[in-house]
Image (cartoon, rainbow, N blue to C red):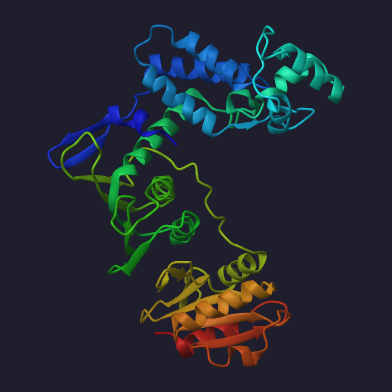
Amino acid sequence: MLTSELIRPYLRRRGDRLYVTQLRETDHWQQTAADLIALFHQHRTQPQRAFEAALTNYEADRTDYNIIRGLVKVLKDNADFAPPFTPIAPPELRERLFADGPAFATRDLFHPQTRADRIAAVAAELNVSLAQIEATLFADRPSEYLLTDPGPDWTPIALIARYNLERLRAALYWSDAMEVEIHDNYKDFWRYLKLFKLMFWAQPLTPSGYHVQLDGPISPFVKATTRYGRQFAAFLPALFLSDRWQMTATVRPPQFDQTLEYRLDHTTPLQSHFRASGDYDSRLEADFAAEFADKFGDKRGQWLLTREDEVLLLGDTVMIPDFALTHKRDGRRALIEIVGFWHPEYLRRKIAKVRAAQCHNLLLLVYERVNLASEKLRDVPGEVLYFAGKPVLKDVLAAADRIAE
């Protein structure tokens, strides 16, 4: 992610609103991006300091170095670096070399052993060359790390787009609160909220969607502001996985003397690099949906099956049932959760959420071979159906009709 120094020049205030300028995909910047990508790849297997030296030469007397360094930051953040192989751990080598105090290039009365003498002695002890000792001495510095994988196959346009997204992200470093309205792709939204450990409060919207409030890094309720700020800003691309959303954050960047409003929504012409969930989490869910579509899809049945379209809010977490059945005539709904995974901890968390939800129109479809006896589900709201090979749709629809609200 971009540092504050790399984002501040591109923050603009218009009245009480904050705007982040975007880098245009001009021929000039596409050529610059192409040059940086090529330069980066040329230094594969070389230490970072070699690339930094080449970058300094490339910048020369250009005045747009701030943008260049921002593009490079994107490249480096998505690449892999690793310390070089050394015959001995660098801290251990330094401990041996410095054990007898300072050593200089020439001897004197108080320092009879020179630097070269000490290096030669340790090299003899370890049976390695003098060059290996010199290379190992500070090999644990980041500047000595080797570029092992330059990352994605960037195109100039893709690199510029990602850099622009990073600009939008970084503006949230100075936010005290964010409000989001989201209308689809709930699962990924809450998955990334949990991944980045953000504090939130949510409530449903009418007729659909959710309003979510999040504490920002400069909120009085946040203690580890730097770490939380990075997580808070890092979350932003999760919004771009949805087709319909809007975000409003209150921010106070240090160069402005007032709190400003920062807005983004689904019309922002950028894409997320976060991985979206697949259509289904398991073959069991996919087969259930396919069989329903085959037998009751289109106009052939009274029920409409939809995937993960309702969120059950449970304080600091949520439960998103796998499916919902909506009656086409009267609008009654039944939620469906398929329990087909056997891991005990998974089952414990699942049932705890079911109990916490207290959702009386929730239908649990439980695979008979999981370790979940009927007595463990005796006090859960809604209804429970066990199945052997696959759920029986006739029984599922009958149960849905009984509990739907």
Locate residue 292 relative to residue 82 in the image: left or right.
Answer: left
- The reply to whether residue 270 is visible in this rendering is yes
In the rendering, at what x and y percent does residue 102 appear? 64, 20
Q: Residue furthest left?
A: 15
Tell me which residue sits at (68%, 77%) in the image: 390
Number of numbered discs visible in the structure rendering: 0
Q: Is residue 174 above or below residue 37?
A: below
In the image, taking residue 274 as reference, residue 181 lies left or right, namely: left
Residue at x 75%, y 20% (from the top left corner) = 133
Image quadrant in which the C terminus is located = bottom left
| x and y, in percent, of residue 30 in the image | 43, 19
State the residue in front, 390 or 330.
390
Q: Quadrant of residue 45?
A: top right
Report x, y in % for residue 198: 41, 57
At 44% from the left and 11% from the top, the residue drawn is 59
Q: Left or right: where does residue 12 sit relative to residue 84?
A: left
323 versus 379 height, above or below: above
Check the image and name the residue furthest to the front.
109
